[in-house]
């Protein structure tokens, strides 16, 4: 794995950074990196600013916690067959891709594996819920649920908080029904964040520089940062809707009412990880499988479901999301770890605690550069994603997972969005962009948002 290791560990080697570029990109996550590549290919000068002291955004791999690569952020490389270079890049650099399409799921009832009748009831709950929420317009998923369905809370926990980052009451069926199919579904042994960093190598990125204000009142833009002001013709904003809603970046003129309302209509959901390292004991659980357990039928459930030993590491990665995830994120980390360990030990026996080494919880809920995990439209407001994607006067453009069409909430979607929007910007500035007229570009943007299909 020499190629991937070197890509991850070498310091960033950046291009020369112009003082007044054609385009300033705010955020060096997957969307910002993709945008920078497209802009440079289109002959435009660009500077990417990133408030964190690293690149990758919500794709973040670190080895300090457990001594092996661990993805604190997004873990799955999923998406359409075309337009996303990470799979080819991973293979080129010698990364280890683990096909996760065949992952199994283990269901526990108390301290024992579920019997066949319980497994059948669990699968029926999934089937009945999905039959009622898919193919429906834009309403709360909770409003479509059958009453008194056994194992409904377990299925809701996976579909809602742990997939979409929100509880069923806050889950838009419009969001659910708009997702595209996957051509691939990989875990990355060396870390998905490591792969994103590799894709950003050589780009003109300034880390530790936060945008504080965007003035789009003139012909171009002026972006005030914590390290001076950058003047450019165009700005591409890739920060989360949580950051936009926080007011951390001031806009002059102020954002139009419909844009501000769209930001409020597509707030951040939360999926947090509580990772538990053990001493090598596997408790009979296989690598790369999911571990679920029965909970009281009250919803939203206070559940922490697991991915066991991903990529062979001795870590059970617990997931908590929705309101319960927010609540645990506001608690002390030790309290959250103790909860997850308790749930694990309830299944595996109290002896599991003797094999426990340490645990951590991710901080996406309180991190001021994210303020959540990924965006989730409120029920009845799925259409606000389109408004969120509209540029301001062909000077300020918006990209990222929140406006990624059928691949929202995914790293591949963020990349596709950044690449697409940068192509629009090249077109606006004059160059080999996407299409010639504002009307044509708006039509193409709408097709990207509504109907991205896998080839």
Image (cartoon, rainbow, N blue to C red):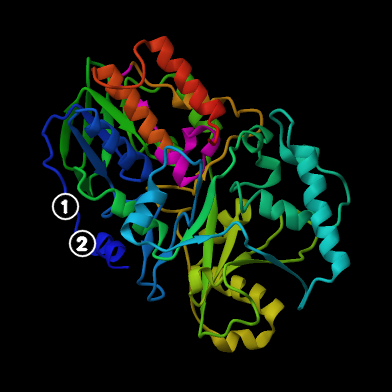
Look at the image and say whether residue 416 sits in the magenta stretch: no
Taking depth in this image into account, of 151 and 197 the one nearest to the observer is: 197
Taking depth in this image into account, of 452 and 248 the one nearest to the observer is: 452
Left or right, 243 with reference to 279: left
Q: Give residue 389's position: percent from left, percent from top.
A: 45, 26
Left or right, 394 with reference to 377: left
Left or right, 273 with reference to 237: right
Callout 2: helix, strand or loop? loop
- The quadrant in which the N terminus is found is bottom left
> Do the CB atoms of the residues marked 2 and 1 lie less than 8 Å apart?
yes
Q: Give residue 18's position: percent from left, percent from top.
A: 11, 35
Q: CA distance from mark 2 to mark 1?
A: 8 Å
- The answer to whether residue 253 is seen in the rendering is yes
Q: Give residue 67's position: percent from left, percent from top.
A: 37, 76
Crowd class of label 1 (few under 14; some 14 to 19; many from 20; radius 10 Å): few
Look at the image and say whether residue 400 sits in the magenta stretch: yes
* Residue at image location 48% in from the left, 74% down from the top: 313
Left or right, 3 with reference to 265: left
Q: Quadrant of residue 97?
A: bottom left
Q: Quadrant of residue 111?
A: bottom right
Tell me the number on the disc at residue 140. none
* Residue at image location 71% in from the left, 28% down from the top: 137
Above or below 41: residue 343: below
The magenta segment is: 394-415
Which residue is tagged 1?
13
Q: Quadrant of residue 351?
A: bottom right
Crowd class of label 2 (few under 14; some 14 to 19; many from 20; radius 10 Å): few
Q: Give residue 69's position: percent from left, percent from top.
A: 39, 68
- The answer to whether residue 297 is seen in the rendering is no
* Residue at image location 85% in from the left, 59% down from the top: 121
Which residue is tagged 2?
10
């Amino acid at each position: 794995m020499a190629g991937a290791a070197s890509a991850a560990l070498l310091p960033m080697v950046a291009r020369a950074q112009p003082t007044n570029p054609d385009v300033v990109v705010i955020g060096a996550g997957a969307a910002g990196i993709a945008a920078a590549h497209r802009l440079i290919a289109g002959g435009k000068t660009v500077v990417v600013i990133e408030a964190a002291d690293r690149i990758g955004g919500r794709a973040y791999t670190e080895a300090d916690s457990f001594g092996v690569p661990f993805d604190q952020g997004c873990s799955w490389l999923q998406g359409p067959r075309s337009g996303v270079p990470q799979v080819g890049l991973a293979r080129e650099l010698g990364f280890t891709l683990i096909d996760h399409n065949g992952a199994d799921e283990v269901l526990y009832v108390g301290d024992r594996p579920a019997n066949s009748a319980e497994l059948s009831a669990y699968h029926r709950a999934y089937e009945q819920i999905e039959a009622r929420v898919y193919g429906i317009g834009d309403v709360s998923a909770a409003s479509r649920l059958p009453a008194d369905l056994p194992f409904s809370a377990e299925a809701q926990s996976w579909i809602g908080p742990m997939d979409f980052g929100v509880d069923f009451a806050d889950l838009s069926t419009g969001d659910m029904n708009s997702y595209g199919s996957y051509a691939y579904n990989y875990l990355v042994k060396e870390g998905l964040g490591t792969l994103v960093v590799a894709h950003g190598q050589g780009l003109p990125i300034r880390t530790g520089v936060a945008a504080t204000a965007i003035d789009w009142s003139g012909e171009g833009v002026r972006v005030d940062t914590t390290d001076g002001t950058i003047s450019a013709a165009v700005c591409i904003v890739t920060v989360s809707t949580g950051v936009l809603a926080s007011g951390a970046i001031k806009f002059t003129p102020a954002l139009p009412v419909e844009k501000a309302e769209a930001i409020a209509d597509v707030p951040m959901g939360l999926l947090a990880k509580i990772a538990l390292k053990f001493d090598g004991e596997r408790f009979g659980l296989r690598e790369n499988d999911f571990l679920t357990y029965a909970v009281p039928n009250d919803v939203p459930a206070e559940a922490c479901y697991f991915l066991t030993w991903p990529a062979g590491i001795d870590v059970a990665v617990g997931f908590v999301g929705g309101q319960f995830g927010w609540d645990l994120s506001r608690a002390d980390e030790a309290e959250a770890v103790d909860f997850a360990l308790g749930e694990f030990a309830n299944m595996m026996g109290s002896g599991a605690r003797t094999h426990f080494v340490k645990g951590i919880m991710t901080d996406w809920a309180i991190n001021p550069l994210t303020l959540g995990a990924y965006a989730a439209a409120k029920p009845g407001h799925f259409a606000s994603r389109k408004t969120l994607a509209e540029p301001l006067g062909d000077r300020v453009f918006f990209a990222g997972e929140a406006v990624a069409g059928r691949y929202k909430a995914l790293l591949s979607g963020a990349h596709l969005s950044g690449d697409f929007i940068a192509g629009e910007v090249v077109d606006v500035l004059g160059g080999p962009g996407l299409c010639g007229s504002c009307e044509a570009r708006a039509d193409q943007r709408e097709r990207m948002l509504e109907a991205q299909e896998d080839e």
